[in-house]
Image (cartoon, grey):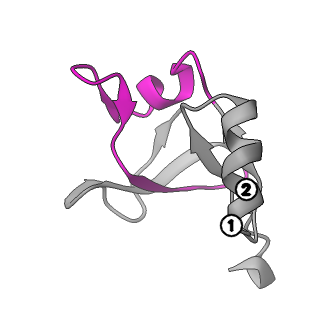
């Protein structure tokens, strides 16, 4: 998707320190961002409030910030082409 201008990012509720340790053991071909306050995680509706962690999720957001598709676990959240701003 990079040939279409897509940018891949990872978001985790872990601290930057935890990310550093995690990334020392693994190599990802994309940046891993920290959301320790769960702001973005909650905004996308994927916060497991019981455990205060994010459900494993995937989103496609266009260059205008419009959420085009999303999935958390086995639950499809937004159908392709749907328009919802985040």
Relative placement, left or right, of 74 versus 37 is: left
Relative placement, left or right, of 76 versus 53 is: left
Residue at (74% x, 32% y) in the render:
16
Q: Is residue 44 visible?
A: yes
In the image, 55 versus 68, the foreground residue is 55
Q: Quadrant of residue 54?
A: top left
Tell me the quarter of the image containing the C terminus. top right
The residue tagged 2 is 23
Q: Quadrant of residue 62?
A: bottom right
The residue tagged 1 is 26
In the image, 2 versus 14, the foreground residue is 14
Q: Are marks 1 and 2 in contact (CB under 8 Å)?
A: yes
Residue at (77% x, 44% y) in the render:
20
Residue at (59% x, 21% y) in the render:
36
Q: Secondary structure at mark 1?
A: loop
Q: Residues within 10 Å of mark 1 (few under 14, many from 20)?
A: few
Q: Is residue 37 magenta?
A: yes
Q: Secondary structure at mark 2?
A: helix
* Position of 70 relative to 52 (above/below): below
């Amino acid at each position: 998707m990079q040939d279409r201008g897509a940018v891949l990012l990872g978001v985790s509720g872990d601290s930057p320190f935890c990310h550093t340790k995690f990334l020392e053991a693994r190599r990802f071909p994309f940046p891993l961002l920290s959301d320790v306050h769960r702001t973005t995680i909650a905004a996308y509706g994927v916060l497991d409030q019981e455990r205060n962690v994010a459900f494993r999720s995937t989103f496609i957001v266009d260059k205008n910030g419009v959420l085009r598709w999303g999935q958390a676990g086995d639950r499809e959240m937004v159908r392709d082409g749907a328009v919802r701003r985040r």
